[in-house]
Amino acid sequence: MMTQGFTLWFTGLSGSGKTTLSREMEGVLLERGMKVELLDGDVVRTNLSKGLGFSKGDRDTNILRIGFVCNLLTRNDVVAIAAAISPYEEIRQKNRQLIGRYVEVYCKCPLDILEERDVKGLYKKARLGEIKNFTGVSDPYEEPSNPEVIVETDKETVEQCVAKITRTLELLGYIPVIGNGAEYSAEEEEEIKRRLKALGYI
């Protein structure tokens, strides 16, 4: 069965789980026979957006570039997975409008927990003023207004997050259903359906 492309866009603060979940979802989608390209924010900055800084204008340009590539992939029946902080709602909405088949996943995690984790030591450096324009500390992060999926990465396991994202994509008809859906509890299923209903999908 020929499947259409779409973009799976992960947004959230640094350390909220975007890269981990995007890699897990890449595996899930490949197992289902999809063509997948993963665009990680850090990797994109090294290649596609080399030379851009962290001013609002440069951040917007970076996210719009990722959106442009995702749109090209989506049009050619590839699943584009983007994992980037993408802090500004206006720019995320521009990408949504450009791409069309766009599923936003908000990796939600309280700032104090992210600062406790601080795997890369970035929050500490930002608090000490060693990193300027750091999202969540000295730069704003605007929460998504209408994400298809919200995963609370301080409360949900990686497996639970992946199951929620996967089931959402199944219900949207973007990926083939495998098995009988037994890995989702009735409560989880209802939560996902409520979210999609509220957004006007079902």
Image (cartoon, rainbow, N blue to C red):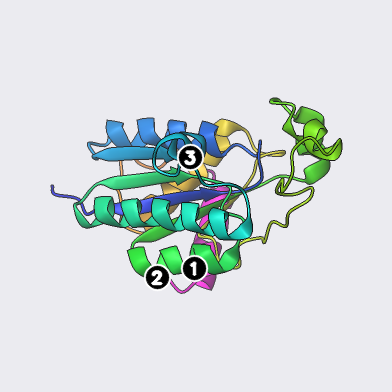
Q: Which residues are magenta?
A: 185-202
Q: Residue at x 62, y 33 (%)?
A: 157
Look at the picture and state if 17 lies above or below 71: above
Instruction: Give the amino acid at mark 1.
Output: Gln
Q: Position of residue 112 (x, y in %)?
A: 83, 41
Q: Is residue 114 visible?
A: yes
Name the N-terminal-most of marks 2 and 3: 3
Residue 131 versus residue 101: which sits nearer the camera?
A: 131
The label on residue 45 is 3
Residue 194 versus residue 81: which sits nearer the camera?
A: 81
Mark 2 and mark 1 in contact? Answer it, CB < 8 Å: yes
Residue at mark 1: 93
> Is residue 30 covered in magenta?
no
Q: Residue at x 46, y 34 (%)?
A: 46
Instruction: Give the amino acid at mark 2.
Output: Gln
- Secondary-structure class at tag 3: helix
Look at the picture and state if 144 lies above or below 8: below
Q: Is residue 202 visible?
A: no
Mark 2 and mark 3 in contact? Answer it, CB < 8 Å: no
Residue at mark 2: 97
Q: Residue at x 30, y 46 (%)?
A: 79
Instruction: Give the amino acid at mark 3.
Output: Arg
Direction from residue 48 to residue 197 in the image, left or right:
right
**Label 2, label 3: how far apart the Cα atoms are:** 23 Å
- Depth check, mark 2 against mark 3: the one in front is 3
